[in-house]
Image (cartoon, rainbow, N blue to C red):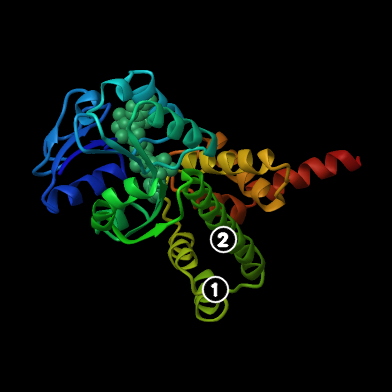
Amino acid sequence: MQIGFIGLGSMGSAMAPNLVKAGHDVRAWNRSKVAQDSVPGGTLVEFAADAFQADVVFTMLSDDTAIREVILDAGLLASAQPGLIHVVTSTISVAFARELELLHEEAGLGYVSAPVLGRPNVAASGQLNILAAGKADAVAAIEPLLATLSKKVWKLGENPTRANTAKLACNMMIAMAIEAMAESVVLTESVGLDRADFFELILGTLFSGRAYESYSAQITEQSFEPGFKAKLALKDMRLATEVSKEIGRTLPMLEAVREGLDKAVSAGLGEKDWSIMADMTVRGAHSLQSFEINSEKKS
Ligand code: NAP
């Protein structure tokens, strides 16, 4: 199959080679220059429009703005190969997914929201979990491609926003888990308990899940190379907040993790892994500030 692939960042550069390995003719495009062998066996094309001359095009750009600029503003839907199916694997806003669905329908193209769970190393080994939603015929047509990239494809129905909302909810829960672990470390280290020992305890008893496993290791090792950049995680918490506002609900834990990430990004840590938020909590970067604010209010 002829496949376009747009966006060879941390995730895209890990995913696109797996499509080549599965025998597909992949035409990949990235805004900045990337090494010729970024997609071994595939072709690097000069223009994003070239990637839209295919049966299926994947986009793995960072956010709504990037997709709008590269695809919509450049008129790629109008010049796309007839019958093309566009698979957006980025984590985007629910409102933008709605807009994309409509615009693709008007252009006579297929559209599937297919955000992914898993970091770049997981993507490279073809073990992502993919949350897919879109018209049944479009999802069926691309399912073998999604299977190539993933351990499991979770089909969430015909409404693309289900996949986008589920993905935002997943990231919201991971952020909450990171913050929960950090706050537990604050308590347990206050009595001299080693954080590695405490995490061994919680992983072996109450919380044995994947998010706890991988982020407790990062918090223990204090290793914050991405992974998933804090600035992108902040984007996701803002998008989750947009959904909560749209339905008229305030979600206090979401607000707390969004603020934590906001502080990390404002402190110049946006390119670090999002688990840097835990480091700030453990070091007291938030609580000291709120303590000072509270003290000022009292005096
Ligand atoms: P990344 O490494 O920062 O890569 C971002 C990609 O978007 C790059 O190809 C970048 O091009 C491109 N881009 C950004 N702004 C652009 C613009 N205005 N015009 C054209 N291209 C633009 O991000 P990533 O980690 O791969 O994440 C990509 C998406 O996957 C995000 O939506 C993220 O939330 C989601 N995601 C990430 C992870 C993860 O663990 N990393 C996991 C699941 C989902 P340049 O190279 O030119 O900058």
Marks 1 and 2 close (CB-CB < 8 Å): yes
Residue at 32%, 25% in the rendered image: 77
* Ligand 1's quadrant: top left
Q: Please report whichever mark, 1 or 2, sits nearer to the chain's N-terminal start.
A: 2
Front residue of 180/57: it is: 57
Viewer-proximal residue among 220 and 67: 67
Q: Nearer the viewer, residue 112 or 275?
A: 112
Task: Tell me: is circle 2 under 8 Å from ligand 1.
Answer: no
Q: Position of residue 139 (x, y in %)?
A: 34, 49
Whether residue 225 appears in this view of the structure is: no
Drawn side of residue 251 relative to residue 260, left or right: right
Looking at the picture, tell me which residue is in the foreground, 103 or 97.
Answer: 103
Give me the disc on residue 207: 1
Q: Give above or below for 7 relative to 80.
A: below
Task: Give SS at disc 1.
Answer: loop
Q: Residue at x 35, y 26 (%)?
A: 107
Q: Residue at x 24, y 59 (%)?
A: 125
Kindly identify the residue that appears in the image at 39 percent across and 41 percent down: 90
Find disc 2 in the rendering and name its residue. Answer: 177
User: Which residue is at the far right?
Assistant: 299
Against 226, residue 47 (above or below) is above
